[in-house]
Amino acid sequence: MHHTDDASTALLTDLYQLTMACGYWQSGIAEREAVFHLHFRKNPFQGGYAVACGLRAAIDWLDRLRFTDGDLGYLRGLQGNDGQRLFPEAFLTWLGQMKFALDVDAAPEGTVVFAHEPLLRVQGPLLQCQIVETALLNLLNFHTLVATKASRVCAAAQGDTVLEFGLRRAQGIDGSLAASYAAYVGGVHATSNVLAGRRYDIPARGTHAHAWVMAFGDELESFREYARTLPNNCVFLVDTFDTLQGVRHACEVGDWLKAQGHKLGGVRLDSGDLAYLSIEARKILDAHGFPDAAIVASNDLDERLIQSLKQQGAAITVWGVGTKLVTAYDQPALGGVYKLSAIRDEAGAWQHRIKLSEQAAKISTPGIHQVRRFLQDGVFVGDMIHDLSAGGEPSRTMVDPLDPTRRRTFAEGMEHVDLLVPVYRGGAKVYAQPSIHESRAHAAAQVASLHPTVRRFDNPHSYPVGLEQSLHALRTRLVLEARGYVEAG
């Protein structure tokens, strides 16, 4: 992450989070216990699932959550509409002394998740719950989006190697590092981003650019010089002048490599008809005795184009995916939200909270949520959101929040797992962060546990996600009360 001069990122927030925090402090409810949930309302890319990502980045941010003297000095200089100081000095003093004290539960990095269910639950002092909102949304929204895109790209590649080549098209330094991390969790095999490789232990891969060939002017000579310099990294970019002639030149240098005890790694195609050129390149490579040489393809690839090239019989074995992966090109935002769902009253009793909307999908859900995932023969069959504040073991019947006539009861004894795991308790980290490689393996296993109809790109099957029946009844009652149809109490 790109840091400010004093290495503080506490001000990575919207101003209104701090003005509300000041209001909570002034009103005397800053320490009142509250619960918020982070979720998204629609699966990205018109797909059937998402891959949760960004928890590591969120933990890194939360671990550093302290307002420094520099932060407070900046806030001290902010003015209201009347030209006077925006924040009282006493509030800034309190903010500078604040100790992180939240409970945080989250779906582990790489977990398959769906619309309307929480990726993260935050519980603790109301003021602290509020000021972490923006950063958590920023980090989980983008990472989850890119990890999901990577999962889809890798699915289209059907086991072929996928390389993330997006650094030069990414959204700045932070965007490039986040994208490389998330893409690896989502399934890519390596990145061209060397800083991400070092920072996150991601394999780094790369070849050479057209500039190398153009600098020599003669393609064959440029390949020879590259082979002399890096005989163990010879994948030649062959489309600078004439693609198929470039493949023949690669084979000629490949013979020299073989004589030196090395091997031709392959050729890379970066333009033109990738299906036709890859098929013809394969013929040339095979005819010259290089059946193991890879054919790497790049050029604005995404899951749809890879799927099409596969259907056309392309002989591509390695896919370099850049712009459309790291920018989540066809859906630039996940649309995650963070909603208050419960707060304790002065007597310490939980009071459920609900947000209404004219759109059913935007009505929030009250309570303290956990997500129970049911499995049958290793396949995920449904996710039930239940309310921990209700106490006791939840029922096994869930209701579709968008269509209450659709219900599902899971059999007694059916295998299940609760998705949200403890990350912080009272501000102390209690979670052992898996390595990036473990998170990547977790994501692959999670996606493999989905029914193929949920994974398909076009009109995927809608995976069942619902509210446990008593939680659905509570939500319905609160909606009716808020709209004046039922007397409160």
Image (cartoon, grey):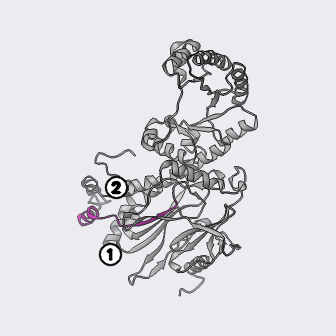
Answer whether residue 417 is visible to the viewer in this image.
Answer: yes
C-alpha gap between disc 1 and disc 2: 26 Å
Could you tell me which secondary element the residue under label 2 belongs to?
loop
Which residue is at the front of the view, 201 or 83?
Answer: 201
Task: State the residue position of label 1.
Answer: 28
- Whether residue 96 is in magenta: the answer is yes
Q: Residue at x 55, y 71 (%)?
A: 365
Q: Residue furthest right?
A: 312
Task: State the residue position of label 2.
Answer: 64
Q: Residue at x 54, y 45 (%)?
A: 183
Q: Which residues are magenta?
A: 89-107
Measured along the vertical axis of the image, is residue 318 above or below residue 142? Answer: above
Measured along the vertical axis of the image, is residue 118 above or below residue 234? Answer: below
Numbered badge on residue 460: none
Could you tell me which secondary element the residue under label 1 belongs to?
loop
- Whether residue 224 is in magenta: the answer is no
Q: Residue at x 38, y 44 (%)?
A: 2
From the viewer's perspective, tell me whether residue 73 is left or right of residue 391. left
Residue type at mark 1? Gly
Residue 161 in the image: state x and y as whole percent.
61, 38
